[in-house]
Amino acid sequence: MTDLKTELGEAVVAAFAAEGVDAALARVTPSDRPDLADFQSNGALAAAKALKANPRELAARVAARLEGDPRLASIEIAGPGFINLKVADAALAKRAENVAADAERAGAAVVDEARKVVIDYGGPNVAKPMHVGHLRSAIIGESLKRLFRFRGDEVTGDAHFGDWGFQMGLLIVACGDEGLADAFMVEGDGPFPAESPVTLADLDRLYPLAAGKAKEDPAFRDRARKATAELQGGRPGYRALWQHFVAVSREALKREYGDLSVDFDLWNGESDADPLMPEMLEHLKATGLLVEDDGAQVVHVARPGETRKKKLPDGSVIEAPSPPPLLVISSEGSAMYGTTDLATILDRKKAIGPDLALYVVDERQAEHFEQVFRAAYLAGYAADKSLEHLGFGTMNGQDGKPFKTRAGGVLKLRDLIDQATDKARERLKEAKLGDDLSPDEFEAIAHKVAIAALKFADLSNARTTSYVFDLDRFMSFEGKTGPYLLYQAVRIRSLLRKATDQGLAPGAIVIGEPAEHDLALTLDAFSQATVEAYEKRMPHVVAEHAYRLAQSFSKFYAACPVLIAPDEATKASRLALSKAALDQLVIALRLLGIDTPERM
Ligand code: ARG
């Protein structure tokens, strides 16, 4: 089902083509003057230069070709040669009916050819606390996963759990030093206790301690490095202990992500690519890509001539390759962050065979991904351009620096959600919402409002920009916020319930009033919003649409009474429009990872 804007765009392109104008110049966009027109095409201006024609005359010839199209109520030439189009109410009514009948997709098109897509997001680490980068990755990644799936792709979301790096060696040594895990410290094949010797609280305490110690105490750091290499090398006691770390962490993270409505298809970790390591190293060696460099093994990824200035410790400046080589095996013999990423690409190629892999990770890791992707292309582990790093800005505190909790520590997801839920309860009470609900229901709604506020605040910004954390603003029931959108959806639900109580049902849609015209145009625009968000990998386009829809509905509801409309046919038509608006709003919010309550 094609949307009206696209259909009209095609008609305009055809009319321009008949006048010898290239399709690229003949674009149709929403009108700059909604009071005068719905859409406009400025094609005649650009094309007239190329054709050495008078733009107004060219526009008039194109307009003449469009004359008589039943989907258009008017075609006018304005200014130096803009073509202004107004859509016919009957065509809009028909399109609105299609949207209304399509409860699952609200009129949104699917891709012509479905692809296999992997989305690598979340990326939390065992024991290391999450920071805002992990939070944003989870929120943006979840939305992209839903959006790609909605468009028809076959999508696998993978948490790519950080479970294989130096932090594991740190924890092993710290546990050993505190005598927490003596049974696991012995060499040999075990057996080792099946019960975890540590709790989540232990891990939360031990990691910062060990990380701090490693900074000051080189001997401790070296022991942790050695433990990391031994773990990766397969020392049974370390592996057994490590498995407990992973299980304890994963369970806690699953709960916290669950609270955020973030859900991974795969909870694979960096370690899952470990079995592929020997094969990968052998292949990289055989192809000559893996080379020795100062005791380490690296892959050179810069092309000849790609350099940048680099200052050496002695103060001299050299031209160094840029991006720098990918470190595959450190001089201690450990696999590094980039190594597991490269092996994971190979693993996914074998297990899934993705056409596209999207990495939703902090912009500050851009160089890391540039190195890994180049190495993967060189090694033939992924098709050219099939790997994309989708970076994002940070969520900042009022001081403009990456957000920290009130106590000054790094973010704890649990605390953030609790803090937001407190605020949501407060706001609901102020607005006298949910007064008549049971305490359980009220809690469930406060939770939904809190999550909607956090997620919408994040996703309404373009992915690449940073924004300031401001719970008061995020939680307002007015303005461009999650709570406002939930409130609008719940209002429509309540309207539809009243209609049912009165025995009214949605019926044929007739468009007459300007507010109905605008609402139908907005319903039409959803499909293109999902296409644009998908192509740019930018959820904020869907967020923008949700807001526009809520506002358009609000104006419609103020101008066009539904339950007390003058006649039964008008009631039925407006109910159908209301129901379509609700379905579309709920779907758009769902694409952002936001659940809509039944009432509040
Ligand atoms: N665990 C990493 C971190 O905390 C993020 C993982 C991102 N994904 C990846 N494939 N490298 O920085």
Image: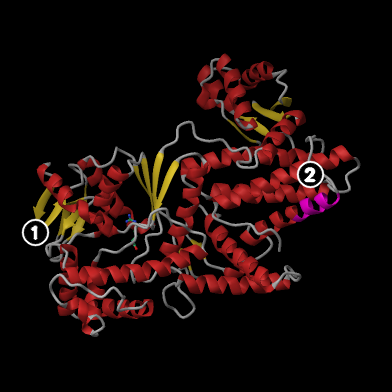
Q: Mark 2: which amino acid? A: Leu
Within 10 Å of disc 1 (Cα), the crowding (few <14, some 14-19, many 20+) is few
Is 499 one of the magenta-colored residues?
yes
Q: Which mark is drawn over residue 276?
A: none
Is 111 one of the magenta-colored residues?
no
Identify which residue, 600 or 255, lies in the foreground: 255
Badge 1 is on which residue?
294
How far is the residue under mark 2 from the one under mark 1?
A: 73 Å
Within 10 Å of disc 2 (Cα), the crowding (few <14, some 14-19, many 20+) is many
Image coords of residue 145 (percent x, y): 46, 49
Identify which residue, 212 or 490, lies in the foreground: 490
Q: Residue visible at 65% across and 42% down?
A: 103
Report helix, strand or loop for mark 1: loop
Residue at the extreme front of the image, as rendered: 191
The image shows residue 586, relative to residue 12, as above or below, that is below
Please report the bounds of the magenta region as a residue range. 494-502
Query: Quick one: quadrant of the N terminus?
Result: top right
The image shows residue 273, relative to residue 213, as above or below, that is above
Q: Residue visible at 42% across and 70% down?
A: 252
Badge 2 is on which residue?
575
Image coords of residue 72 (percent x, y): 72, 25
The image shows residue 517, relative to residue 333, as above or below, that is above
- Dominant secondary structure, magenta: helix
Q: Residue visible at 33% across and 77% down?
A: 203
